[in-house]
Image: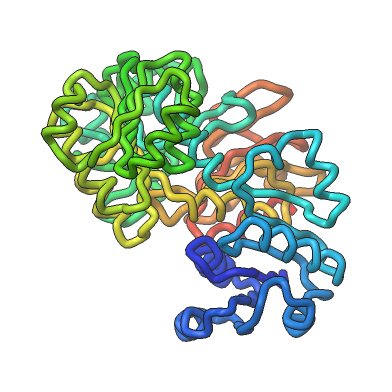
């Protein structure tokens, strides 16, 4: 595909890297020449120094022959204007980043499409949803629902007390008479493994499981995870994400929000009806103690500083908080945060990339997710009448070694995949794939 990315900020550059690694023809436009030079030095892409809202600069990028136009400059108005211009100049599909929730309302969707913006993406809104999902279940690092939760992917840190530790996948599969979950990948010492039957679980493995709502409790038991209800939540940072999480939690949870900026604190106190807003520095241990950190079930750190979020979550963990969530936008800190035991990691760049990436997959795709703590991706692909994937049982088809099939949704019913499973036309299939395997599996669904 020929892809133009307007805006070389954090989201734009990360999406550009992903698209380059997937062998797309990428053009990156920005008015910051130094930033573009850095990208051009490390990635196989074309750069144009110019304005994302300039007709001449968009024409210089040959926008009329663009398959996908992604507008992610720092300002919402610029993003929308850039996408509108690109569409009018001939771009096939346009995506614009926004930060206003009302634009996402169903009654406004057609309005923006008429203007020329095919899709709107609001990373902060998507991040807030991920945080809400992570708070529903303790003991997991990441949760992704497919087909309204009929199949669920859990990322779970396996500790030495877990019943499955030191057992092979084959041995774990023999524990239960019915297959309740699939182990689709293991992240160990920074490397992602697509496991086979003779692979064993080790202490500190981050394992990825596909299961159903009915199989979830048994999976948690096998992984040694004790569940409890979250009632008291402390949020550090009155960012857009922090505010959205507080708004969604305050009706059902006891919520405290700490914000260092006094003016912002006062504004949040007026806007949040049931959340207690505190003006202070969340890195101050004495402040956390005074505000009852030891009584908290969950701690969510979403300031603009990744280091502060990691440090604050460590302090909360030290004080006995069992569930922690940190926004970590600096990609270099992801492994660090994972290794020091931060519960759930949120990264807006990866969230935005997941949303955009599905538009580059040639097969029918209903869901794509870039995983926070792994280089792999999980996709929900739809099989067609002439897909190669339906030609036999999974054990008979030569699946790529860097791909794993987790489960299937067929006629509204979830199926945990086994070697004897045969995929049928119109099945939704949850696939776990390394970057090297995505194009291979895509061909099997075309």
Residue 296 in the image, given as x and y percentages of width and height: 25, 22
Residue 28 in the image, given as x and y percentages of width and height: 61, 76
Write the residue at 63% across / 56% down. 76
Q: Is residue 52 above or below residue 296?
A: below
Write the residue at 55% across / 41% down. 126
Write the residue at 26% across / 40% down. 342
Write the residue at 50% across / 28% down. 271
Residue 241, visible in the rendered structure? yes
Q: Return the residue nearer the eye: 370 or 268.
A: 268
Q: Is residue 4 above or below residue 220?
A: below
Name the image colouring.
rainbow
Residue 340 in the image, given as x and y percentages of width and height: 20, 46
**Rendered-image quadrant of the N terminus:** bottom right
Q: Return the residue nearer the eye: 196 or 415.
A: 415
Res 411 quadrant in image: top right
Residue 413 in the image, given as x and y percentages of width and height: 66, 21
Question: Left of 434 or right of it: where is 426?
Answer: right
Question: Left of 256 or right of it: where is 446?
Answer: right
**Rendered-image quadrant of the C terminus:** bottom right
Residue 436, visible in the rendered structure? no
Q: Return the residue nearer the eye: 339 or 435.
A: 339
Report the label total: 0
């Amino acid at each position: 595909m020929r892809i133009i990315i307007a805006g070389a900020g954090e989201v734009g550059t990360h999406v550009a890297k992903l698209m380059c690694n997937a062998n797309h023809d990428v053009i990156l436009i920005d008015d910051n020449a130094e930033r573009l030079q850095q990208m051009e030095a490390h990635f196989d892409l074309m750069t144009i120094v110019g304005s994302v809202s300039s007709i001449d600069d968009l024409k210089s990028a040959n926008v009329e022959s663009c398959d996908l136009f992604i507008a992610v400059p720092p300002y919402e108005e610029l993003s929308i204007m850039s996408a509108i211009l690109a569409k009018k100049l001939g771009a096939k599909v346009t995506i614009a980043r926004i930060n206003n929730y009302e634009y996402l309302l169903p009654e406004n969707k057609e309005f923006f499409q008429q203007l020329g913006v095919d899709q709107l993406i609001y990373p902060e809104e998507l991040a807030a949803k991920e945080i809400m999902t992570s708070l529903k279940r303790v003991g997991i690092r990441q949760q992704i629902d497919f087909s309204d939760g009929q199949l669920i992917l859990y990322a779970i840190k396996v500790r030495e007390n877990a019943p499955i530790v030191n057992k092979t996948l084959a041995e774990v599969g023999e524990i239960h008479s019915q297959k309740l979950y699939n182990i689709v990948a293991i992240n160990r010492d920074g490397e992602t493994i697509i496991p086979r039957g003779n692979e064993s679980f080790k202490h500190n493995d981050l394992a990825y499981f596909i299961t159903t709502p009915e199989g979830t409790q048994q999976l948690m038991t096998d992984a040694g995870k004790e569940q409890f209800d979250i009632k008291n939540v402390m949020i550090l940072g009155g960012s857009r994400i922090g505010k959205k999480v507080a708004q969604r939690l305050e009706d059902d949870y006891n919520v405290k929000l700490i914000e260092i900026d006094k003016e912002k604190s006062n504004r949040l106190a007026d806007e949040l009806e049931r959340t207690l807003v505190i003006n202070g520095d969340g890195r101050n241990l004495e402040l956390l103690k005074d505000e009852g950190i030891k009584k908290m079930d969950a701690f969510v750190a979403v300031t603009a500083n990744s280091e502060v979020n990691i440090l604050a979550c460590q302090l909360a963990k030290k004080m006995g908080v069992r569930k922690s969530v940190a926004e970590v936008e600096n990609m270099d800190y992801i492994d660090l945060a994972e290794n020091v035991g931060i519960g759930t990691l949120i990264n807006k760049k990866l969230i935005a990339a997941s949303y955009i990436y599905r538009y580059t997959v040639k097969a029918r795709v209903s869901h794509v997710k870039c995983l926070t703590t792994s280089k792999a991706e999980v996709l929900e692909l739809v099989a067609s009448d002439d897909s190669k994937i339906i030609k036999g049982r999974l054990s008979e088809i030569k699946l790529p070694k860097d791909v794993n099939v987790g489960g299937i949704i067929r006629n509204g019913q979830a199926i945990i995949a086994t070697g004897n499973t045969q995929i049928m036309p119109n099945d939704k299939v949850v696939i776990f794939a390394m970057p090297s395997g995505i194009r291979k599996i895509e061909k099997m669904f075309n």
